[in-house]
């Protein structure tokens, strides 16, 4: 086992040839690009969680800490980061909702609900929750 005939070099297991792959392979197709952007969006979703936790901490620490947080969050780089994060969170949400009909089969009275209805329900619920949150914030 694993011995080579006399005069031959050492025996190595055969491996399939793998051509080199460019680091920018994901730029070749729109679907690959969207996949990579969705993966990257998770970093910005995490930023939103951290930002929200910092806000909650500032509010619970009193008016001085809240004012300091507002001053810090008004810096141009924080605003730019939040704008970029908002775009990525929106991409993350839209791609997640578009996957929902593929990830879950909803049955109603023994019949599968059409994928478009599942998708529409997600968007309607999202719009409703967003409207309620906006109403609470702006009233």
Image: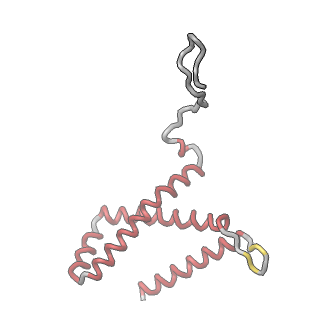
Res. 77 image quadrant: bottom left
**Which residue is pictured at 76% across the width and 73% down the height?**
112
Number of callouts in the render? 0
Where 117 sits versus 84, above or below? below
Where 98 sits versus 138, above or below? above
**Which colouring convention does the figure follow?**
secondary structure
Task: Return the residue found at the far top.
Answer: 7
**Which residue is pictured at 61% across the width and 31% down the height?**
16
Task: Return the residue found at the far front.
Answer: 1
**Which residue is pictured at 73% across the width and 76% down the height?**
107
Res. 125 image quadrant: bottom right
Q: Is residue 106 left or right of residue 70?
A: right
Task: Return the residue found at the far right.
Answer: 110
**x and y percent of residue 119 in the render?**
65, 71
**x and y percent of residue 114 in the render?**
74, 71
Q: Is residue 127 left or right of residue 80?
A: right
**x and y percent of residue 75 in the render?**
27, 66
Q: Is residue 52 left or right of residue 129?
A: left
Which quadrant, please, contains the C terminus?
bottom left
**Which residue is pictured at 46% across the width and 82% down the height?**
134
Task: Return the residue found at the far bottom.
Answer: 139
Where 12 sits versus 81, above or below? above
**x and y percent of residue 7 in the render?**
56, 10
Res. 63 image quadrant: bottom left
Q: Is residue 115 left or right of residue 135?
A: right
Which quadrant, please, contains the N terminus?
top right
Where 65 sits versus 34, above or below? below
């Amino acid at each position: 086992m694993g011995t080579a005939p006399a005069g031959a070099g050492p025996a190595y297991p055969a491996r399939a040839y793998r051509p080199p792959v460019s680091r920018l392979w994901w730029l070749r197709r729109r679907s690959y690009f969207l996949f990579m952007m969705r993966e990257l969006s998770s970093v910005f979703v995490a930023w939103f969680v951290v930002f929200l936790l910092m806000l909650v901490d500032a509010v619970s620490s009193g008016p001085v800490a809240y004012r300091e947080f507002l001053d810090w969050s008004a810096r141009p780089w924080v605003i730019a980061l939040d704008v970029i994060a908002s775009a990525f969170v929106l991409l993350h949400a839209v791609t997640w909702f578009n996957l929902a009909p593929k990830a879950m089969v909803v049955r109603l009275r023994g019949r599968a609900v059409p994928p478009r209805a599942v998708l529409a329900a997600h968007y309607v619920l999202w719009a409703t929750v967003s409207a309620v949150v906006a109403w609470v914030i702006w009233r």
